[in-house]
Amino acid sequence: MNSPSNAVPQYPRDSQAIVHTAAAATRPLYWSVRRELWENRSIYIAPLIVAGLILLGLLISALFLPKRLHDLNDPVHQREMMLAPYSIGTAAIMAAAFIVGIFYCLDALYGERRDRSVMFWKSLPVSDWTTVLAKASIPFVILPIVAFAIMVVTQLLMLPLSAAMLMRYGISFHVLWVNLPLFQMWLMLLYHLVTVHVLWYAPIYGWMLLVSAWARRATFLWALIPPVAICIVEKFAFNTMHFCELLKYRFSGPQAFRFPMIGDMPMDPMMHLELGKFLSTPGLWTGFVLTAVFLVAAVRLRRYRDPI
């Protein structure tokens, strides 16, 4: 006769260890970032469209470029005219990336509450911190990388196009190559993206994510109303514009890293890499503190905010 078994199923004493191991195996942050890329294709489509327009514009303007170069006897003016399309194209792609980052942040947490998909995502073993950090990584990491890659490829495509049009009118490719320091330009572009679009603009993106987590509608207006209201109240109450100057300072940046016009860029790119002066700027560290506050508030709002 078999006696009833009194054996108790053996479970790991620390069940949280299994959960932690499973979460690490599934890499929730990695897949959360992948989800953002799947759901927001404008992250790379918008800069690609701008790059295509730049190439089309260059093709049209190149028909008249050699004649303008012949009309300019000054080598300095010739160099500036050769570099102008690259400067304008670079600025256009960076502006497109910045605008995409702003509108992405405004819709990142608001959109999932609007379509109520937030209830599904919260049911997964992904913390609110992971979700918010994954969304923040788009303007802080992904967009600068995408913008830089598109700018490099666009300029590489512009180079043979410009050379072909110059050679057609008897101007040597050597003239373009000497006046076009591509590697120095790329170094400056990378520096500008890291310092401006990542480090300096961090509180702007953090504020947009906070508004996205809080607002029930019209996120763009709610992102603008508080700073505009503060400026108006300060002006009428104290007849000062300190807060407006702070906003202007945040969007324009200190002189330590303002991006020079490529046509005026010296041959030594390190002349503009004033990293020590940039890192010692008080506004940089104040922005880091504000960004951390905004992200913490966005995490808490996502945790307790109901779907719309």
Image (cartoon, helix red, strand yellow):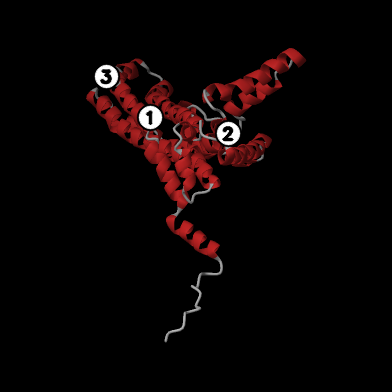
**Is 38 drawn above or below residue 265 in the view shown?**
below
Kind of residue at badge 1 = Ala
Label 3 vs label 2, nearer the camera: 2
Q: Which residue is mark 2?
A: 210
Q: Identity of the amino acid at label 3?
A: Leu
Residue position for label 1: 46
Quick one: 38 or 85, which is closer to the camera?
38
Q: CA distance from mark 3 to mark 2?
A: 48 Å
Q: Residues within 10 Å of mark 3 (few under 14, many from 20)?
A: some
Residue 195 appears in the figure: yes
Residue occupied by mark 3:
63
Q: Secondary structure at mark 1?
A: helix
Image quarter (top left, top right, bottom left or bottom right) of the N terminus: bottom left
Vertical position of residue 171 compared to residue 147: above or below: above
Q: Inspect the image, locate mark 2, and give the three-letter code of the amino acid beneath it.
A: Leu
Q: Residue at x 45, y 30 (%)?
A: 100
Single out the mark in the foreground, 3 or 1. 1
Q: Residue at x 42, y 48 (%)?
A: 31
Q: Is residue 241 above or below residue 257?
A: above
Q: Residues within 10 Å of mark 2 (few under 14, many from 20)?
A: many
Q: Is residue 237 above or below residue 82?
A: above
Mark 3 or mark 1, earlier in chain? 1
Q: Position of residue 294 (x, y in %)?
A: 61, 36
Disc nearer the start of the sequence (1/2)? 1
Q: Residue at x 53, y 44 (%)?
A: 133
